[in-house]
Amino acid sequence: MWNEVRGLRDGIDYGTPPRDGEPVTLTVDGVEVTVPEGSSVMLATAEADRAVPKLCATDMLEAFGSCRICLVEIEGQRGYPASCTTLVAPGMVVRTQSDRLAELRKGVMELYLSDFPESEIPDGWSEFHRTLEEVGINGHRYGKGRNHFDLPVDDSNPYFLFDPAKCIVCSRCVRACAEVQGTFALTIQGRAFESKVAASQDEPFMESECVSCGACVQACPSHALVEKSLFPGGYERAKPT
Amino acid sequence: MPNPRKPERETITICAYCGVGCGFKAETIGNEIVRMTPWKEGKANHGHSCVKGRFAYDYWCHPDRIKTPMIRDSIEEPWREVDWDEAFAHAARELKRIQGKYGRSSVGGVSSSRCTNEEIFLTQKFVRAVLGNNNIDNCARICHSPTQFGLSATVGAGAASQHFDSILQADVIMVVGANPTEGHPVFGSMMKRRIRQGAKLIVIDPRRTETVDSPHCRADVHLALRPGTNVAILNSIAHVIVRENRHDPEFIKSRCEWQEFEHWAELVGSEEYSPDKIGPVAGVDPEDIRRAARIYSTGPRSTIYYGLGVTEHSQGSTGVMCLGNLGLACGMYGREGVGVNPLRGQGNVQGGSCLGSWPHVFSGYRFVTDDATRKSFEAEWGVELDSEPGLRLPNMFDAALTGHFKGMYIMGEDPVQSDPNQNHIIAALRNMECVIVHDLFLNETSKFAHVFLPGSSSLEKDGTFTSAERRIGRVRQVVEPLAGYQDWEVTMKLMNAMGYDVEYAHAGEVLDELARLSPAYSGASFELIDRVGSVQWPVNSDAPEGTEVLHTQEFPRANGLGTFMLTGFVPTRERVSDQYPLLLTTGRILTQYNVGTQTRRTANSQWHPEDVLEMSLGDMQTRGLRDGDSVTITSRFGSTRLKVVESVRVNPGVVYTTFHHAETKANAVTSDLSDWATNCPEYKVTAVEVTKVTSSKQCQAKTSVTRPAQRERQVEEIAVVEEVST
């Protein structure tokens, strides 16, 4: 509980909240690392300087396990567990890189990208863009398919806007509103392809229960929620390609 | 431009708004601030923010900012823009001329809790070492003065006993007369987090605030007391604790004055304060008083956070003592997760008080009359200092009216707007020959000034702030000062122009000097803060990286023991009557800050374009009012006009409004009673009547003749040390 707030570091994202606990030693890619009990494997990989790519995880929020980018291999365990929701254990042997992991991550990232405006890929500097780079993807693989490019931008708030075209529905905004701010103004509405971020009863942000604390903007990995001040000439939406 | 522009540079600094003191990264491109993002290593906010700190920063480059010094020979003349040298020379010439003609004590100064520690320290140095008297005050005498008085009396230190995230170890949280989710939102989020983890919540507040009931956060007990009955309720809680043997005799015997405890227990244990007696007086269910007492005393770790709803009463100091007494009686002091903590309003409210901007004490509350203390300052400053305490701010104005006080340096304050007696202040200023205003914007006071020195916002300068948790953090220059100088440089150059030779290469050297002369700050330096992020005072050789929890071994009183103050309930003289049947109480809203000089110059006004009057449905119906009607609120002191809205947050008989907009003139209505000990005004209780505005003629807001319209109130301050020591 103490470390969850005091263990946070500027410029480092451990992926899951730092914990208080007895030391646990494990190996990540051959590097021995000791972290408090209750920590995630993801946090251990960051501590070992072998951080895995991720999208739905960030260390101010509890693990969620939805994006499937942070997969790792753990000796003695079947399959490819998500490192964010897997807790460390003494003597655990973790591998963060393999051909199979690279293939899996790439496959998932390509699916995310298929519903992300292609024109927004160059020059982007969001976490989503960094993850694309880490995973080694630089363009759309699939042809034009269904997307969310037609949903309207919500620019009702004077300070930030929400562009659903860039939203990857990772729920970080929803969780930040709940866990960090404690207002519970946001939710994911609908299912599957229809799922989208909604404020209160699907109202514009400005008319919702949102208190404009900025926690959702801070948490958003893809600049779907973004400060208006970063667009001096006003926000110009990506052209559908 | 589809992708956002990328900031080039980030500077870590502290938010300039409330007393929480959040760490921020100011991100810039060139000299433009493109966004503020919360700093994950900020020890008060841990990466979180609110709508004010994160977004409402554009006031810094608002077109209203004054960027060139201005002078004039009389206030009838228009301002004349001059360069800095001429402004300094003119100001110095005038101050010297005045002192030559009217004497050394005919001039003085005032500083503000919105300034940095370094600026506050330099301003008092300017007055003491350069002007040669002690006519220095801190405009913010009002509002948390009962905290200094009440907590000093019981536990020996008028400051928060804990650090903010100590709340993450609390089992019981008692919030009294405060609404953290609006007034101190980042702390409010931390509190809610702890409540979601299972901590119990007791709220004592006339209003059903968001703190009382919001998603996944509901008070276990809400004592929606009638405004003005804090002391009665707190004594009744103490009554239950004492009568049911729920106090902590071991703690009291080892850490407190036992005899004083017995006196107190006799008072609060008397039948007069039984829940069955007090319940009807305060308008609450006696059973709820018992439940609150049982929950608080059970703990095992119970903490109290309180705000101006405790202090701004005729028994404000008594209310604070009640809280100190409760903490001591239940052993809720000296460890994590307990304590008694004021929630303060301004960014540097604690520093403003610590650093000697008072007519009678140097930094660290040490008396100017004390030879040893004065000698240490004389040795450092190289001049002889006046041993006579100087004039308080109101006395400076009084002296101006009698022709004995002729010149004043006003740094970051607006007494014409903020002082209780506007006409009096204006007459006093008109009687002065040189009024120097040092501020970001022209204000009410500058209308009567002869020299205007353009100030720098906290984004344009270096220094430190001390937040409500005693945390000293670094204000770092993000952009170049619009007017060319940081505020501390302006004060320094004014000193130089007066012939006092002093040179600081940077603000850190002022902090070094301040540290040498102030015991609680003795270990503070830019280097230390750069290394560890921020420190809580006392920071000294015993605690080289500061002190998080106070009173772990003993209380800073002569015998090291905490004591119990007798807190008899004396109802306020402000009562409802047939003519004024409602009680008006006031508060804050999330998006606006204080009187709004900063936030009203940002888009935050989109949320709160005007102050409104909250009223219960029943009270509205009996007056034939409908949602949105314009109403006149009349008290014994004055009247004003507002829009009324139906609210379930207030009980029948109680109405509520905020005070962020000057046009509201809420303070024209409020009572002119004040705390018995510190004169902190009783802003929280006023008997009023509300009537519908029927003709357009009545639409003009009327203000009382004797009461000024625009008072910056709830400006917080803690120290009125005379009362503490005498």
Image (cartoon, coloured by chain):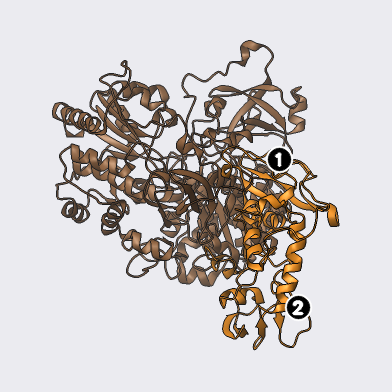
Chain colours: A orange, B brown
Q: Secondary structure at mark 2?
A: loop
Specify the label residue B374 is tagged with: none
Instruction: Confirm whether residue B360 shows in the render.
Output: no
What residue is rendered at 48% in x and 35% in y?
B713
Residue closer to the observer: B184 or B88: B88
Relative to residue B257, is residue B74 drawn left or right? left
* Image-quadrant location for residue A238: top right
Q: What residue did someone put label 2 on?
A: A80
**Residue at mark 2: chain:** A
Vertical relation: B434 (above or below) B281: above
Position in image of residue A212 (x %, y %): 64, 45
Relative to residue A126, is residue B673 drawn left or right? left
* Image-quadrant location for residue B575: top right
Relative to residue B351, is residue A120 drawn left or right? right
CB within 8 Å, label 1 to label 2 = no
Residue type at mark 2 is Tyr
Q: What residue did someone put label 1 on?
A: B649
Vertical relation: B708 (above or below) B675: above
Vertical relation: A105 (above or below) B600: below
